[in-house]
Image (cartoon, rainbow, N blue to C red):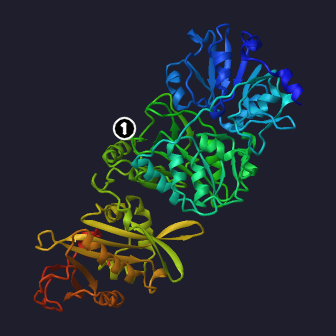
Amino acid sequence: MMEEYLIKKVKAEEILGVIHPGSSMFVESGCAEPQHLVRKLIVDNIDLSDVQVYTTIPLRTYSDFGGDAGSRFRIHSFFVSPGMSGPFSTGKTDHIPLSSDMLDRLIREGSIKINTAVIQLSPPDEKGYMSLGVTVDIVRSMIDHADIVVAQVNSFMPFTCGESLVHISEVDHIVEYDEPLVSCPVEEFDFETKQIGEHVANLVKDGSTIQIGFGRIPDAALKAMKTKKDLSIHSEIITDTVIDLVRAGAIPEGNMITGSFCIGTEALFDFVRQNRQVRMRPLTHVSNPQVILTRTPFVAINGAVEIDLTGQSCIALGEQGAHFGALGQPHFNRIAQITKDGKAIIALRSTSRDGSISRIVPRFTESKMGIFTTQTDVSYVVTEYGCVNLFGKSIRERVLELITIAHPKFRKWLLDEAKRMNYIYPDQVLPPEDSLYPARFEHGQTFGGKDVFIRPVKITDERGIQNLFYSLSSDEKFHRFHSHVTSLHHRQAQQMVNCDYKNSLALVVEASEAGKSHIIAITHIIMDDEEAKRRTCEFALMVHPEWQNIGLGSYLLKTMTQIAPELGFEVFRAYIWEENTKMLHAFEKLELHRYATTGYNVVKLEYDLDPLAAPREEPRTHSGGNHEDDGLIIPDDLDLIPDSKILF
C-alpha cells in the first residue's frame, strides 16, 4: 500500500499541467478546503485559461478571481458564504441555486463534467485508507466521476467515522502539505440573537433530532438547548456548539450526531477525530427523506434575511456577514413538517444589525433575493420579539401574526402597507408602539388533570376569542355581558385583544387537543375611571363551559389581583350580575379588603390592592330606583368593549 502511495506522491508544482484550458475543476470547500493546492494549482497558476472552478461552501475569500471576465478561471459556488458575498455581488463569481439534495444528481447525471477534483485527506492508515475528515459533502461523487483526483494529505485533518474513507487507489496524485484547517469560529451572540435562540429552544421538545442551517442564529438556538434532554443531531452542518450540548448532557452518549460538514474550529476537529458518536455522511444520506422520517420528532432550524407579510422567506446579500444559497434549507423545512411532531422553524432578526431596516417586509427589498421558503411551506417564524406559527393561516392572519414579532418601530408602517395592499381590515388597529409583550406572565398550569398554557393576549387572538364567546350559552352570555348579545364581530372583538400591557392587560388560556391549541378562557383588567384619585382597574372574565367549575376562574381572578399592582393599580373593581353566584363566590375567596354596592341587579365590588391604604367609608347599598348608584352606571345600550363594565 505504501509503495503505491509513494509512487503517487508529488509536489504541487509538478502537476500544474493536469489542468487544461477550458476544463472544469471541483475544489473541496468548507473547513476542508485544500488551501495549499488552491494557491498552487489555481490562484498562483498563471497558465490557467478559461478554467471553471466548482465549489460548495467556500469559507475563505480568494486573493484573485481569475482575471477579467474569468479569463484565467471562474468560480461557481452552490453557496455564497460571507467571505464570498462581496465578489458575488460585484459579478466576479457565479452562484448556482440548487438544494443540497440535488447536488449529487447534478454530478451523477453528468450535468457538470468534472475533469479534475482537488480534495484534502488525512494521512493513510495501515490498510491504505485516508479520511475525508471534516467534510464529506459530495466529494465521493466527485471522486467517482472526475477524470483526475488530486489530494492534499494533511496531518491536521482528523480521521473521522462514517462514510469518509478514500483508498489510495482512488487518488491519482498525492501532495503532502501540513497546515491548519480553515477555521470558522462561532461569533459572539448579541442580545437579540440570544433572545431568538431562547425562543427557538422553547419550541424544541426533549428527544428531538435537530437540523441547523448556516449562521449565527441557528447556532444561538443550539446554545440555548443545554438544558434539553435526549437530543440528536442530523444536519448538513455540525458546529462547535454541538460540543457544548454533548458536555451538558443534552446529547447523551449513544445518541447519534450525523453531519456532512464540520464548520468550526480546532476544538470541533479534535472532537470528531475517531469519535464513533459522530458519523460523517454524504449529502445523499443526510438529505434522504426516508432517513429523516425515522428521526422523529425532527426539528429544522434555519435562518432568513427577510420574510414578507405572506410568509415567504429569503436569504440574500446586503449586510456584513450575510450569506446566500439554499443548501438543504427548503428540503429539511418541508420534510420536518411531515415527520411526527416535527417542526420547521425560520428564525431571523426583526431588523438589520444597525436597526435601520425591518427584516419583516411587505415585499422583498432586493432583486437578488431568492425565495427559499414559499407560502405553502412556512410554519414557525421566530424573531427576538417572539414566535408565531403560520401553518394553515390566511394571508390576513399571517400579516397580523408577523407584525406582532416585528420591531415595534416598524409595526405601524407594516400595518399601513398591509392595508394599502388589502391584506387586512381597513379598521385594523395595533397597540401603541411602546407596548412590549410581557412574556414574564407566560406560564403553565393544570386544571382537571389537563395542562394549559396561560399568556398575555395578542391581536392575533381575535378569532379565538370569538370562538370562545360562541361556546357560551345565552344565560352565560347575559351573566357575563349584562345584556342579551348573540354575536361578537371583528370591531368588537379586536378591542378585547388590543391591549397596551400598561393600562390594559388580558391573559388567555390555551388548551391543546390533537395537536391544535384553542383559547378556553380570557381575563381582562383595564383602567377604569381615569378621574379617580386612586388608579383603578376593572376586571372581567370568560371561561369555556367545559372548563368551568374546576378552579380555573378563581385562579385567573387571583392571578390578576397579583398582576394589577405590578401595573400600578391600587383598586381592583368588578361588576357582577347578582345571580352570577359562582363568580360572587370566587370573589369571596380573595383575602383583600372589600367594598360592595348593588344597583339594578348588578353588584359592584372594589378591593384595595394596597394593604396600607387608609380605610374608606363603606358605600351605601341600593336595590334600584335609578340608573346611577355611587358611580355605577348601567346604560340601556351596552356595547361589548372592555371599558363598558360588561365582560362578566
Q: Is residue 443 visible?
A: yes
Task: Specify whether 73 is left or right of 614.
Answer: right
Q: Which quarter of the figure has residue 593? A: bottom left
Please tell me whether residue 411 is drawn above or below residue 63 in the rendered image. below
Please tell me whether residue 74 is drawn above or below residue 589 in the rendered image. above
Q: Amino acid at mark 1?
A: Ile
Name the spot of residue 58 as percent of width and height, x first.
60, 29
Q: Which residue is mark 1?
A: 357
Seen at 32% across and 54% down, the residue is 430
Name the spot of residue 191 as percent of width and height, x first.
39, 49
Q: Which quarter of the figure has residue 113? A: top right
Q: Is residue 112 visible?
A: no
Give the total of numbered labels.
1
Task: Specify whether 165 is left or right of 358.
Answer: right
Residue closest to the eye, 199 or 596: 199
Task: Specify whether 387 is left or right of 273.
Answer: left
Q: Residues within 10 Å of mark 1 (few under 14, many from 20)?
A: some
Residue closest to the eye, 428 or 1: 1
Name the spot of residue 445 as percent of width and height, x first.
47, 76
Seen at 32% across and 43% down, the residue is 413
Residue closest to the eye, 194 or 404: 194
Q: Quadrant of the N terminus?
A: top right
Task: Specify whether 107 is left or right of 234.
Answer: right
